[in-house]
Amino acid sequence: MTSTDTQPIVSIRDVHKSFGDLEVLKGVSLDVKKGEVICIIGPSGSGKSTLIRCVNALNDIQSGSITVCGIDLTHSGLDKLELRKRVGMVFQQYNLFPHKTALENIMMAPLKVLNRDPDEVRAHARQLLDKVRLHGKEDAYPGELSGGQQQRVAIARSLAMNPDVMLFDEVTAALDPETVKEVLLTIKELAQEGMTCILVTHEMGFAREIADHIYFTDRGVIVEHGPPSEFFDNASDPRTKEFLSQIL
């Protein structure tokens, strides 16, 4: 391993974020190394989603610093398009274009943003549909797909940009229980292949299985963090214990 391999691919330092008078993040710091899987858990309103939206510069921060793939997100000349070539994000809502097929949804960004060869983009999009186990759904429109299938198209669409980091913001929250498993399996396979992933999730069993490190947030701060076995079995902070007692 070279010295650069030990540098975090995502570095968050003392980040503060407010919406008006409401301070949502109150000095959050964490590092993510290349190939790591980080799960952020906590009650609603604890700042989880705000935090990962900051990692993709969807939310600006008031103070602190965020560096992603060597890009300083607080730099006045930040090229957000360049950043989002490196960082993929999948949301709770699928946000697919309803008038485009699954294949067309996946192809749009590489064609329009990266100006890649259409034949190469189409071939890659087909590979990605196979990867998320949607072979044969190339010509299906979003309205013809289940929620879980749409979410897997959304994951494939993010992967089409060949990102270095993937962000997942409660991607199973809007799904029926029977479709959750297929989406989680897709994310698990990405993690096993070495994709750097930051997930906000309420799926505790999944977090325990997939994560290298768990972060518990409450009221805008990281209360406790650690490897899954240590975190779930030996939590020390009263707030962490109370949260886990309610959901496990």
Image (cartoon, rainbow, N blue to C red):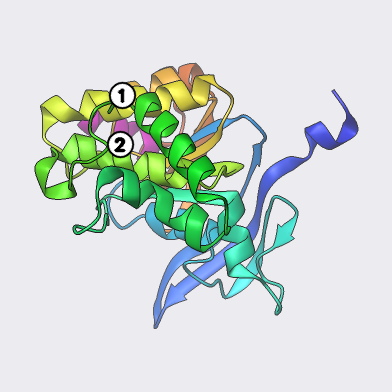
Disc assigned to residue 133: 1
Question: Which quarter of the image is occupied by the C terminus?
Answer: top left
Q: Residue at x 30, y 36 (%)?
A: 152
Q: Residue furthest bottom?
A: 20
Viewer-proximal residue, 99 or 186? 99
Viewer-proximal residue, 231 or 125? 125
**Percent x, y of residue 39:** 45, 35
Q: Residue furthest right?
A: 3
- Per the picture, the main secondary structure of the magenta-coloured stretch is helix
Q: Is residue 19 visible?
A: yes
**Percent x, y of residue 151:** 27, 41
Asked if residue 82 is positioned above or below residue 125 in the image, the reply reads: below
**Percent x, y of residue 3:** 89, 33
Magenta span of residues: 239-248
Q: Is residue 40 visible?
A: no
Image marks 1 and 2: residues in contact by CB distance under 8 Å:
yes
Q: Residue at x 45, y 74 (%)?
A: 18
- According to the picture, the residue beneath numbered tag 2 turns out to be 152
- Secondary structure under tag 2 reads helix
Local packing at callout 1 (Cα closer than 10 Å; few below 14, some 14-19, many 20+) is some
